[in-house]
Amino acid sequence: MRILVVAVLLAGCACSPASQAGGIPEYGYEVVHTYPHDAGAFTQGLFYLNGFLYEGTGLPGESSIRKVKLETGEVLQKRDVPDPYFGEGIIAWKDRLLELTWQAQAGFIYDLGTFAPRGEFQYPGEGWGLTQDGKRIIMSDGSPELRFWDPATLKELGRITVTDEGRPVRDLNELEWVKGEIYANIWQTDRIARIDPATGKVTGWIILAGLATPDGRFVEGQGDVLNGIAYDAKGDRLFVTGKKWPKLFEIRLVKKAAAQ
């Protein structure tokens, strides 16, 4: 299970803090606002739509899709995903909500308004994260590749390989489309990659150290890590949270000075 992956696997991830010295900018953050978040939610997917958060949670027997009131964290609407499916990323497309599962190679389609089931679909490999750019659905599977799907047919249109100065970036997890870029959580780290969707190149690293624990420590190899990015395009607000975190944060990015 992904929750048991140990930190040693990060040795193969091209997401070391050396990126900025090579010319790729790094960003810290300022917390603009803090909101309550269900500490029992193993967050796998997150997006913001029409004033509400939509969240997909994981773990066998605990997976669900939810509509959440941002200001209070109240779960307004919920549908459980049947066991043994491990829920993963979610996205809205028109009047549908799509959800991936981890290793079952199966996804679910729901009515966005009622969460009533409307169908299923299949894909090869694992399912991790989802987002969309207004024309295509974008999927991650834990590898350095991102897949592009036709929203109408859910058939694959192509792929890009995500690289940091030529090195493949593994463990791409939850995704969000932000101002023409793909933001991707890197599994079991406190980092978000900013990715050029045309080339797959990392254009920046967002470092969120200090959000994971009250004293600012980040504990690698634990399940309750950073995962969950949502963007309010109309209000230009960026939200982040983590698995079983009691808080969700609205943040503002702050560019770090380049290393000398």
Image (tube, rainbow, N blue to C red):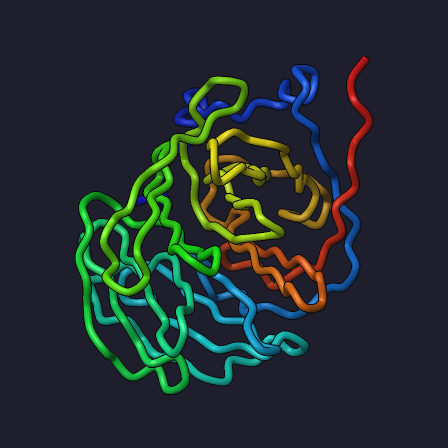
Instruction: Say which quarter of the image contains residue 249.
Output: bottom right
Residue 77 in the image: above or below residue 7 = below
User: Which residue is drawn at the image coordinates 39% and 55% (left, top)?
Assistant: 136
- The answer to which of 18 and 151 lies nearer the viewer is 151
Closer to the camera, 152 or 242? 152
Q: Which residue is situated farthest in the top direction here?
A: 260
Specify whether residue 41 is in view: yes
Residue 27: % across, % down:
72, 37
Q: Whole-percent x and y of residue 220?
A: 52, 35
Q: Seen in the image, is 244 located left or right of residue 9?
A: right
Q: Position of residue 100 (x, y in %)?
A: 30, 58
Total tally of numbered discs in the picture? 0
Left-right relation of 80 to 54? left
Q: Does any portion of residue 7 appear in the rendered image? A: no
Quadrant position of the N terminus in the picture: top left
Q: Position of residue 189 (x, y in %)?
A: 53, 37
The answer to whether 180 is drawn above or below residue 244 in the figure is above
Q: Residue at 47% across / 60% down in the picture?
A: 134
Quarter in which the C terminus is drawn = top right
Q: Identify the residue shown where x is 51% and y is 44%.
A: 185
Asked which quadrant contains residue 70, the reply is bottom right
Residue 132 left/right relative to 148: right
Q: Residue at x 62, y 51 (%)?
A: 179
